[in-house]
Amino acid sequence: MPSLVQSVAARLAANVARVIVGKPQAIELAIIALLCEGHVLVEDVPGIGKTTLARSLAQSIGGTFRRLQCTPDLLPSDVTGVSVFDQRSGDFVFRPGPIFTNVLLADEINRATPRTQSAVLEAMQEAQVSADGVTRPLPRPFVVLATQNPVELEGTFPLPEAQLDRFLVRMSVGYPSQEDEEALVARGPVQTRTELQPVVSAAEVLEAIAACGQVRVHEDVRRYLVQVARATRTDADVRLGASPRATLALHRAAQARAAVQGRDFVTPDDVKTLARPVLAHRLIASLEARLRGRDALAIIDTILDKVPVPVEPSRV
């Protein structure tokens, strides 16, 4: 089964790399989140390729895709849908909003008001929408790919901790290297706007998601994973540590990373690699730590240095 996951991941990565130059790690992390049916927060400065990465991954999946341009005047009903009166039937008919899709690209999500942001909380956690007294399931797979600009703060509304905790990973694309930027310029703007064709079907994605759940996690590795998450709650520099939801997210992500690399077992390196993107956005550093210049990423690095790593755990 890991071979299936590896094949799906390889096809997705190759397709996305057609428009995203020189960012294999960012692409792999986005694919890992997809294979967990987890949501992705792409946070970076303008012009890096946040929206391009999210859109290209969405286009590579054989499923429905909707884009939501978040603005302050966006209403919750613009996201979830609304009931309208049908004169022919003499009854109200529910018209689904863009959230009823396989992949939802929420561009500049922090420009939506807190009221509108909260409209997607139930969908992100339970893959369903409650509107007009009726609960409607969302199609599978369901993934939210959200982007936000951490530099431009005017006219934005910071995401609350409850919503940040529902994102499986937070990632950034980062500036390209000299060689990659030269290649990007040589391609020109037309290539970066290329409409990608699906390379996997929704059924294949669901099959790969199920296969990731079968990846084995030795009890020593599982204990190590839990210790890393729990250490964020007792660290003196942390005001709010990782939730049990974060621990489960780290477990799922480690299984997916192992499967993407063709393994049917999780290693401590999987946990260490994913601890920063899975846990950092869920932590709140204390005021004293921030005054000393320590952020959540530095705190996690310290925790990873302190927690003993299991030595050569069994693969069975």
Image: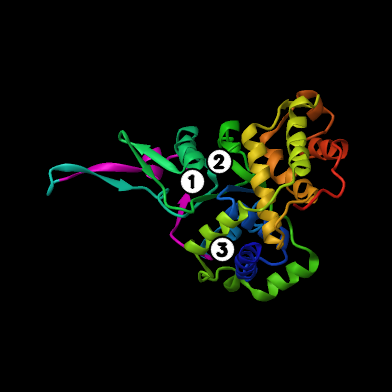
Q: Secondary structure at mark 2?
A: helix
Which of the 4 quarters of the picture holds residue 137?
top left
Query: As shown in the figure, which amino acid type bears the numbered disc 1?
Result: Cys
Checking the image for residue 242, the label placed there is: none
Q: Are marks 2 and 1 in contact (CB under 8 Å)?
A: yes
Q: Are marks 2 and 3 in contact (CB under 8 Å)?
A: no
Q: Which residue is mark 1?
A: 70
Distance of label 1 from label 3 (alpha carbons): 19 Å
Which is nearer the eye, 243 or 58? Answer: 243
Q: Secondary structure at mark 3?
A: helix
User: How many C-alpha atoms fall within 10 Å of the one at disc 2: few (<14), some, or many (≥20)?
Assistant: many
Instruction: Please give the name of the residue rendered at 79% of the width and 70% of the height, measured from the top-left corner.
Output: 179
Location of residue 152 in the rendering, given as x and y in whole percent from the top left corner: 63, 43
Q: Which residue is mark 3?
A: 56
Q: What's the magenta region?
A: 60-86
Q: Which residue is mark 2?
A: 110
Query: As shown in the figure, which amino acid type bears the numbered disc 3?
Result: Ser
Q: Secondary structure at mark 1?
A: loop
Which is nearer the eye, 128 or 186? Answer: 128
Seen in the picture, residue 162 relative to 51 is either above or below; the reply is above
Distance of label 2 from label 3 (alpha carbons): 21 Å
Whether residue 290 is visible, yes or no, is yes
Location of residue 102 in the rendering, given as x and y in whole percent from the top left corner: 46, 55
Query: As shown in the figure, which amino acid type bears the numbered disc 2?
Result: Asn
The mark closer to the camera, 2 or 3, is: 3
Whether residue 75 is visible, yes or no, is no
Report whether 194 appears left or right of 236: left
